[in-house]
């Protein structure tokens, strides 16, 4: 069985999905159409991939040739498009953050969990990074973990909509921080209960491009989370300190180190390894009923609740509770 996939939002990231679909990197999925608001660019891309161009999400969702949908538009439109897809009976893979606000995330989670709803999966792509998957496999070797540190330090965004107050619904907390929130939940298996966050605008004229958060998980573990999007350099780091060992991963450079007593395990991985084929394969298997979606709408809601807590903390100047229900 071949599942025919339409991509709504065929910019840089949406085009990557299309390339993997056209190359057959997730067997059983095939590109069936794309929607891009820029008609000239959309028609050119559609011709390159040999699929129809649709001028709106409505038209793509109504197409009989489309069985399932990837939503890769800016987050402010995620809820409306995903809700429309579900109403049309089409499974959805939605880019992170799942929605633009925690209120929308609650609504989409309710729709996704309704009886008979098609599968909804959130594309938290870092879960498919080989070194982070290795870190997850090694996590039990750390014993009880009391401290986790996660940081992404990146160049300023080149996307116009992330510098437009009318188009973006958040900055580094919402657009990149959700990666870190999801990784912390996935690796530890715990939930966030308390967050204290500070944010600054350094180069972005409309939203924060630096944030630092200190959090407590429901087992007492502390987490430190940082996103810097103003530097002329890049780094992506994970550290975890447990009672039996320490783990350090630079998943941009491709290095992992596990220390236990005097023993040290060093491993290298390909930092450029593609994560989207694994994401697509998991979504395919969820659509076919082989597995439950690895990243559910409720997982997406959890990350939005943490982002919301970060914004509330910055506004009040103190720690706040994380509430997702």
Image: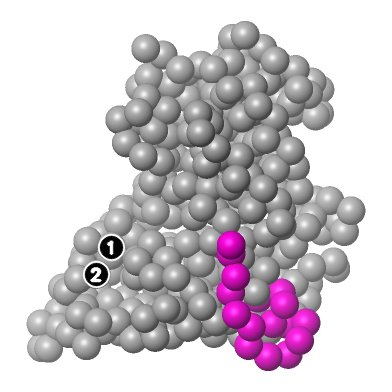
**Is residue 141 inside the magenta stretch?**
no
| Residue 83 pos. (x, y %) | 67, 35
User: Could you give the CA–CA distance between mark 1 and mark 2, rounded to whole angstroms?
Assistant: 5 Å
Left or right: 247 as drawn, with respect to 315: left
Q: Name the residue under label 2.
A: 139
Read off the magenta span.
310-325
Left or right: 133 as drawn, with respect to 186: left
Residue 165 shows in the view: yes
Q: Mark 1 points at which residue?
A: 136
The residue at 39%/86% (across/down) is: 220
Please tell me whether residue 230 is drawn above or below residue 179 in the rendered image: below
| Residue 51 pos. (x, y %) | 61, 13
Determine the residue located farthest toward the front in the rendered image.
115
| Residue 137 pos. (x, y %) | 22, 61
**Is residue 319 inside the magenta stretch?**
yes
Q: Do the residues bearing badges 1 and 2 touch, measured as CB atoms within 8 Å? A: yes
Left or right: 89 as drawn, with respect to 270: right
């Amino acid at each position: 069985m071949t599942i025919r996939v339409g991509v709504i939002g065929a910019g840089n990231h949406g085009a990557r999905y299309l390339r993997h679909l056209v190359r057959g990197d997730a067997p059983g999925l095939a590109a069936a159409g794309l929607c891009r608001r820029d008609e000239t660019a959309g028609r050119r891309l559609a011709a390159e991939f040999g699929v129809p161009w649709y001028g709106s999400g409505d038209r793509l969702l109504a197409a009989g040739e489309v069985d399932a949908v990837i939503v890769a538009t800016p987050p402010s439109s995620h809820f409306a498009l995903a809700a429309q897809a579900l109403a049309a009976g089409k499974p959805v893979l939605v880019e992170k953050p799942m929605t633009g606000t925690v209120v929308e995330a609650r609504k989409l989670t309710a729709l996704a969990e309704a009886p008979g709803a098609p599968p909804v999966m959130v594309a938290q792509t870092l879960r498919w990074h080989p070194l982070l998957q290795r870190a997850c496999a090694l996590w039990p070797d750390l014993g009880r973990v009391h401290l986790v540190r996660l940081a992404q330090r990146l160049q300023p965004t080149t996307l116009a909509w992330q510098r437009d107050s009318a188009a973006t619904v958040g900055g580094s907390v919402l657009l990149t921080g959700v990666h870190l929130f999801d990784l912390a939940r996935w690796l530890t298996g715990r939930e966030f209960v308390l967050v204290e966050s500070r944010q600054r605008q350094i180069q972005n004229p409309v939203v924060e491009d630096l944030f630092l958060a200190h959090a407590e998980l429901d087992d007492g573990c502390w987490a430190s989370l940082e996103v810097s999007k103003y530097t002329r350099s890049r780094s992506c780091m994970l550290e975890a300190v447990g009672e039996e060992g320490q783990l350090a991963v630079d998943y941009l450079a491709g290095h992992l180190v596990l220390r236990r007593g005097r023993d040290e395990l060093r491993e290298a991985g390909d930092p450029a390894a593609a994560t989207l084929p694994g994401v697509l394969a998991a979504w395919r298997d969820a659509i076919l009923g082989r597995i439950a979606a690895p990243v559910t709408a409720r997982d997406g809601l959890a990350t939005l609740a943490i982002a919301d807590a970060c914004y509330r903390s910055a506004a009040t100047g103190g720690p706040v509770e994380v509430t997702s229900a």
